[in-house]
Amino acid sequence: MKITRREFIKCTAASSAFMAIGVPFSFAAAKDKNVDHWVKGVCRFCGTGCGVMVGVKDKKVVTVKGDPNNHNAGFLCLKGALMTPIIYSKDRVTEPLIRKNGKLVPASWNEAMDLVASKFKDAIKKDGPTAVGYYGSGQALTEETYLASKIFKAGLNSNNVEGNPRLCMASAVGGYVTTFGKDEPCGTYDDIDAATCLFIIGSNTSECHPILFKRIAARKQSDPNVKVIVVDPRKTNTARIADVHVAFKPGTDLALLNSMAYVIIQEELDNYRFHSKYVSFMDNKKNKLTFKDYQKFLEDYTPEKAEKITGVPAATIEKIAKIFAESSATTSLWCMGINQRIRGVWANNLISNLHLLTGHIGKPGATPFSLTGQPNACGGVRDTGGLAHLLPAGRLIKKKSHRNEVEKLWGLPQDSLNPKPGYHTMAMWSALAEGKLKALLVLCTNPAHSLPNLNKYVNGMKRKDTFIALIELFKDAETVKYADVVLPPAYWCEREGVYGCSERRYALVEKAIDPPGQCKPAVDILIDFAKRVGVDPKLVPYKNSADIWDEWRAVGRPTTYNFWGITRERLRKESGIKWPCPTEDHPGTDIRYVRGKDPNIPKDHPNKYHFYGKPDGKAVIWFRPYKAAAEEPDAQYPFVLTTGRVIDHWHTGTMTMKVPELRRSFPKAYVEVNKKDAKKMDIQNGDNVLLETRRDKMVFQARVSDVCRPGLVFVPWFDANLLINKLTYDAIDPGSKQPEFKICAVKVSKA
Amino acid sequence: MAIAGLLVHTLKENLEDVERQIRSMPGMTTYGIHQDQYVVVVVEAPSDQMETQVDRINNLEGVLTIYTTYVTVEDELSGTDDR
């Protein structure tokens, strides 16, 4: 039988689908004849971190498919499968650009880097090391963030090292650290496959983490007894498969979660043996209290009292609390709905409270699991310490012993690291606006689109006396407008490095093709920057990112992150390994804090559970009272505005808007209005609607539906032409310093 | 023209209906029902119609979600960018 080229491609497409569900597909024609070779990598988008195989023909990427050996088992969402056109976008920056007379003009690498170095040196000379900073990203490679953080903290003595992850998961870090003493989840994605109850709160998994939603849906399909609870003020696509959808009043999650704890204890569904042995009880002043005190604290949150706060019927609160506790294995999943709150850390604590109270932890299918938004926020920024208060592998700048340990590892004199944490993200952009921060290096992120209350901070970016050097892929990214120098980086599979996803899995993105024009790997740009700005060459002795990886392995080794066994060679062979992984023959860790599962716990440890992040080995149930949002609706601004993602776009849309299929499916932002509210205001589908907050106003087309609960409107934030962040509020969580993107008060009217 | 491989995740009770309806759509080839929850589909469509085609599947009763396992764009790289 003669087979046309078109049929070859069809068979390849079908075979990839069969591979994804593990069904053998023996079409003789199904060979990948349209591809010269495949290169292993990780998807460039969300924190799920799906493994991909990049198909290369004639030195060009022609296709991307799911890696059958990674956690996604060959699946990809539409975004992930459509990454190819982004690489070849005509909007790529392919040569260094310098702003002259207000316009960005091409320059040589030498001229551009000399200018960057001189501006940084001038700023340091005049105002000291705190006048310069680095703003990075959960999209940068691990090696890039580790290196940038080291250059600034060790090389320039400036702790002004921040990044987009502060806007995204700082509250999750705060939650894990306060509850368990160590950051990062204790479980993995495999828990979804073993859970009998999935408690999803503040996460539209279906649109934001489609491949994890696939696992949730498959789990529910495989066993009709599996219960899915979705807690979200919007009836999202995720809520479609829920047994119970709880559309609570925005900003009342703390009361709801405390009320669930009340019901669990009242119904005697708590696991007394577990919490009496492995849990300490603590109030906000860190006083050690008792279980009885906790019961007393929860009296303010009876279902009846909580109903008044949350708008959720008491019977529903009782129902979901019982399902949570009575199921044999409950996994919680949450994301920005919990993190982007003025009390995001507390909300994180309260979810973990429910697990510690019921003992739904450290068993397959039972874990509190925080989802992340960016592909390398966990592995790249959280783990390497790419924030203003952190040092690598969970160490803290303010702790002398941690600083001294890192000084030794980095070959620095004792007590030479700056002991004062730098500016956190919002303080950093405020400092730039106030002219206190003079020179900033930005890598792989788009703050002029992604910061809340944008107008305030963009005014700072416009200042003539401050300097922004931006390492950015695309000419049309919003932040390019305010950059003094734009440096062109190699993209994704144009260079090599590690991504670490939400489940502590480190996986290698291998190089598939050469970058275009004069684009360079960001690691090379950072090393060049360090040399020109006068950093001791001994601090940056690397030839490539693999050298940096080996140093990072050594720096992590003395800690409980220990991933010494995840060598570059293993990463090339395997499709990701989960830390801790202390030796090369260690398979990686699925469950932390459990004897026999977590390599940090001796095999002969007397207790099954050991929360070694805390001095007494006990995790903490926190007494966290209800606190409303920073800006609640009132008579003048009677609605709540919330923002988020749509399935086909990712983050600020600089990548996904380059893909015709994705751009067409969601060409512009819109406002989602509840049917009842729309009727009252005579708003029809497609009508122009004016949204006005205390910061700015903007017109959007209406989508009338029952997705938002009455009183709530939603706008996706990917659209650079309709920057909803001009309207959002920049109040921050006092613990995590993460802004409350998810809630502000808004006036809604027909335009 | 673009070609995509899809897995259509469907509620058990709607599987056969969904498979039949997809089969009757132009440019769609189905490759059977698998594991009581998936329909394997290959879509051929001009790239500007791909998402409309996928949306049509998404709107069928009982379809939970669609996973794309493969999209070829080789033809478009040498062709025109429609921006």
Image (cartoon, coloured by chain):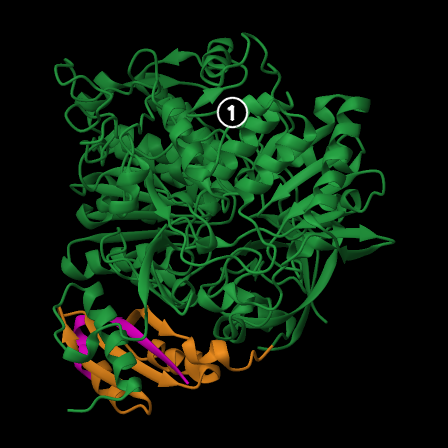
Residue A133: x, y in percent? 67, 32
Chain B palette colour: orange
Residue A367: x, y in percent? 27, 37
Residue A110: x, y in percent? 70, 44
Quarter where residue B17 is shown = bottom left
Quarter where residue A691 is shown = bottom right
Q: Callout 1: helix, strand or loop?
A: strand
**Residue type pointed to by label 1:** Leu
Query: For the residue carrying disc 1, how many other residues have a C-alpha within 10 Å: few (<14), some (14-19), or many (20+)?
Result: many
Residue at the extreme right: A101
Report whether A15 appears left or right of A572: left
The chain painted green is A
Residue A238 is a magenta residue: no
Extent of the magenta region = B1-17
Q: Is residue B10 above or below residue A425?
A: below
Name the chain under label 1.
Answer: A
Is residue A688 among what the camera can see?
A: yes
Residue A677: x, y in percent? 57, 66
Q: In percent of the image, x 46 and y 38: which residue is there?
A: A544
Q: In percent of the image, x 49 and y 42: which residue is there?
A: A252
Q: Which residue is mark 1?
A: A390
Report whether A555 appears left or right of A66: right
Report whether A681 appears left or right of A165: right
Q: In percent of the image, x 54 and y 31: which residue is there?
A: A736
Which quadrant, please, contains the C terminus of chain A?
bottom right
In front here: A341 or A426? A426
